[in-house]
Image (cartoon, rainbow, N blue to C red):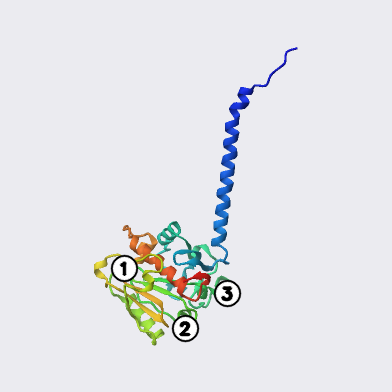
Amino acid sequence: MTTVKPNTDKLTSTQPIVLSFLVTLLLAFGHNARVVANDANVTRLDFQENGKGVLGDRNNLSGHVNISEVFYNGGSFWSQGKPTALGEWMNKRSRFQVRFIPRDTTKKKIYLSPPRGIPWEEIDTDGLFKQPILFLDSDSRNSEIYLSEAECENLRHYLVERGGFLFVDDSSGIEGEFYRSIRRILEELLPMYPIEWIPDDHKMFRCFYHMGGAPVGMNPGNRPLALEGISINGRLAVVISQRGYWSLFTGSSEHYCPGAMRFGTNMIVYAVTNGNVSDKSEFSP
């Protein structure tokens, strides 16, 4: 009787394949385990649609913040688009992640003051006071901005009592109606807190990236060398720019300006770590 011997050569040839598969599987499992562990460190705080929180310290910062588009009775604060480029810059270069939420990704809109005639279920009535920072850009017509009495009162309450932060950017290139009207609104809204120049050594320029002051924006020759702002009880609460950063933040400009992206990052980090809206219970200044 003929005995059939196993083909040991064939078995031997498959061993490296099996071994390689097992090694790959183990490496993949180990990588995923590290990712999950790392994500767990970043997401220990409760980040909902309007969530915001920061962990660690200024040298090892992590966390997450959602920033929504806000409306007033005359239009949108993001009149010229979503700051996509700024979000991509931050999320690629830091463990402090940002998500910008525009009008078309949420049913409930956030208003300075809920307008009449809109169904109640379509309005996020408390959303304004969950925002660690508000971005306000001039529209393409550089038109005057009007706020109702209720909107002004909510904005004042947001900035003073809630510890919020407002960034205003005039991208028109001229000192026109938008710039003059927003200054007038803020002067009437916060008479005890004057609009002043922000020094180049301000904490905002050092809270994440170390910067020597405000970077160049669009058409720098037409803009002042410094930024204006309003401080409330020692905390910078309003920044007013005429440098046209918004078109750089949205990516709509053909120019690339890393300085503007660093500035935008610093401003958000400053608003989150110095304001009273965000969860800082696990952050060490």
- Up the image or down, 69 lies above or below 159; here it is above
Residue drawn at 60 percent across, 31 percent down: 15
Q: What residue is shown with label 1? A: 212
Q: CA distance from mark 1 to mark 2?
A: 35 Å
| Amino acid type indicated by mark 1 | Gly
Residue drawn at 36 percent across, 60 percent down: 252
| Amino acid type indicated by mark 3 | Trp
Q: What residue is shown with label 2? A: 153
Q: Is residue 66 visible?
A: no
- Up the image or down, 103 lies above or below 23; here it is below
Instruction: Tell me if 175 is positioned left or right of 52 in this view.
Output: left
| Amino acid type indicated by mark 2 | Glu
Q: Position of residue 198 (x, y in %)?
A: 33, 76
Q: What residue is shown with label 3? A: 120
Determine the residue located farthest toward the right in the rendered image: 1
Q: Position of residue 148 (x, y in %)?
A: 44, 82
Of the pair 86 and 114, the residue shown nearer to us: 86
Looking at marks 1 and 3 on the same chain, the residue that comes earlier in the sequence is marked by 3
Looking at marks 3 and 2 on the same chain, the residue that comes earlier in the sequence is marked by 3
Q: Is residue 245 visible?
A: yes
Looking at marks 1 and 2 on the same chain, the residue that comes earlier in the sequence is marked by 2
Q: Position of residue 265 (x, y in %)?
A: 41, 65
